[in-house]
Image (tube, rainbow, N blue to C red):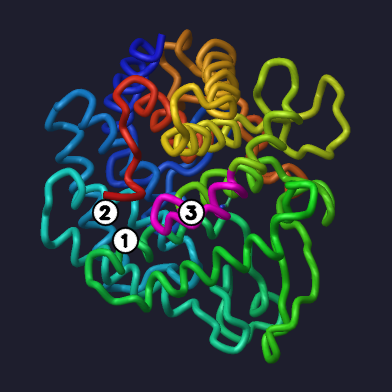
């Protein structure tokens, strides 16, 4: 089943190369991807999809297109095009870092290190955190961290491995610790965002940006947490990070509906119109598969996570993917970007497509994504 789902994804991505041209897909509207220049937080996912398709098919069409996107990412860094946010990690892990991992291309490694340096510019010394969005000292955004940032940290851990300089991993560890302490709650659910006093670093409180309420658990945020803490464990081997990833994963699994694909927020009231977020399920599946890699075979927890991830992925392929829609542009239906903001509800999300294919490649090929060497 995984193989035919991957082959379908590869063919759809092949068709999209001509459709998208020089542009980058973001989210869909009425079944068509909205395309933009390389200027959004999501543009690395298209590169990552192309690299995964290249690795599966060995077809140079994917490699050439992926390399073109990396050139565009070089230009984006040179020109500093909309990089005043922490998603530099997403952008460059899946574009230039993927190229480095696959081809050992020195220019791609150098570009990724430059991107890691740029991300360090988000570090706020007084508060000891990476500011998610907006300029330094911004009245509203200056004190904000968000749980999504955990997926931006691998580029920093990697930069320390590559250069031997600890400045990157020290910041990644501090951010991971801060996220455990303030974003993850006592019952293993999570805040989407948390605010600190910019001058003193004193904690102010948790809030949401894309979730149902400030105290609710936005499912994609929980998924970023699962995968992000598991990746921090991969790099640091600090057992607390694996423990946090496992606990957040259990919360996620225990709150899933019968078909194993999450609604958009675990606290949103559910009726027949409540939107799902299939992208959260795809991200969580990658996180579960990363956790499983760190557990011994036969371990009861490992069996529990294996069972859950099989059910989630089966449901995604059978009920949510476009495997039975030959001409579809996207791979995964029923993602939700920002429900209360009325943005892309029940649509394709390019990150949903990327993590869906990464999860399939993990299951079929023991692939590990592009987050570490
Ligand atoms: N990182 C932004 C989002 O998940 O929507």
In the rendered image, residue 140, in percent from the top left (x then y), is placed at: 71, 77
Rendered image quadrant of residue 296: top left
Res. 347 visible in picture: no
State how far apart marks 3 and 1 are (Cα).
Answer: 12 Å
Q: Is residue 321 left or right of residue 118?
A: right
In front of the other: 83 or 57: 57
Give the residue at mark 1: 158
Q: Quadrant of the N terminus?
A: top left
Q: Callout 2: few (<14), some (14-19), or many (20+) C-alpha neighbours within 10 Å?
A: many
In the rendered image, residue 297, in percent from the top left (x then y), is placed at: 44, 25
Q: Callout 1: few (<14), some (14-19), or many (20+) C-alpha neighbours within 10 Å?
A: many
**Nearest to N terminus: mark 3 or mark 1:** 3
Tell me what residue is drawn at x 81 percent, y 24 percent: 273
In front of the other: 260 or 273: 260
In the rendered image, residue 138, in percent from the top left (x then y), is placed at: 64, 82
In front of the other: 345 or 310: 310
For residue 97, which numbered disc appears in the image? 2
Tell me what residue is drawn at x 46 percent, y 67 percent: 172
Q: Is residue 239 magenta?
A: yes
Q: Is residue 305 left or right of residue 185?
A: left
Q: Is residue 6 magenta?
A: no
Q: Callout 3: few (<14), some (14-19), or many (20+) C-alpha neighbours within 10 Å?
A: many
**Nearest to N terminus: mark 2 or mark 3:** 2
Tell me what residue is drawn at x 60 percent, y 36 percent: 280
For residue 151, which numbered disc appears in the image? 3
Which region of the structure is painted magenta?
Answer: 232-245
Does the beta carbon of the residue at mark 3 sit less than 8 Å from ligand 1? Answer: yes
Overall secondary structure of the magenta section: helix
Element at label 3? helix
């Amino acid at each position: 089943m995984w193989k035919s789902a991957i082959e379908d994804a590869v063919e759809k991505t092949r068709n999209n190369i001509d459709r998208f041209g020089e542009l980058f897909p973001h989210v869909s509207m009425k079944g068509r991807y909205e395309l933009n220049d390389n200027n959004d937080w999501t543009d690395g996912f298209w590169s990552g999809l192309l690299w995964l398709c290249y690795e599966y098919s060995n077809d140079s069409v994917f490699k050439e297109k992926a390399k073109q996107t990396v050139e565009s990412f070089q230009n984006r860094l040179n020109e500093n095009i909309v990089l005043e946010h922490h998603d530099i990690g997403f952008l460059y892990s899946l574009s230039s870092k993927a190229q480095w991992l696959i081809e050992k291309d020195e220019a791609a490694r150098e570009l990724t290190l430059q991107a890691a340096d740029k991300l360090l510019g988000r570090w706020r010394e007084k508060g000891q955190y990476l500011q998610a969005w907006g300029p330094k000292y911004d009245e509203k955004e200056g004190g904000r961290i968000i749980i999504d940032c955990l997926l931006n940290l691998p580029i920093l851990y990697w930069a320390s491995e590559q250069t031997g300089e600890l400045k990157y991993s020290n910041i990644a560890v501090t951010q991971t610790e801060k996220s455990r302490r303030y974003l993850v709650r006592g019952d293993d659910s999570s805040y989407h965002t948390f605010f600190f006093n910019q001058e003193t670093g004193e904690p102010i409180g948790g809030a949401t940006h894309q979730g149902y309420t400030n105290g609710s658990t936005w499912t994609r945020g929980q998924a970023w947490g699962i995968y992000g803490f598991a990746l921090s464990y991969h790099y640091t081997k600090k057992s607390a990070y694996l423990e946090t990833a496992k606990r957040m994963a259990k919360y996620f699994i225990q709150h899933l509906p019968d078909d194993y694909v999450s609604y958009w927020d675990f606290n949103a009231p559910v009726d027949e119109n409540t939107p799902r977020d299939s992208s959260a399920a795809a991200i969580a599946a990658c996180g579960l598969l990363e956790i499983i890699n760190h557990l011994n075979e036969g371990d009861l927890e490992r069996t529990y996570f294996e069972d859950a991830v099989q059910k989630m992925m089966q449901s995604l392929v059978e009920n949510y993917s476009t495997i039975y829609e030959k001409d579809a542009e996207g791979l995964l239906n029923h993602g939700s970007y920002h429900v209360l903001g009325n943005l892309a509800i029940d649509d394709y999300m390019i990150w949903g497509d990327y993590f869906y294919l990464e999860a399939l490649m993990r299951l079929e090929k023991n692939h590990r994504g592009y987050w570490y060497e």
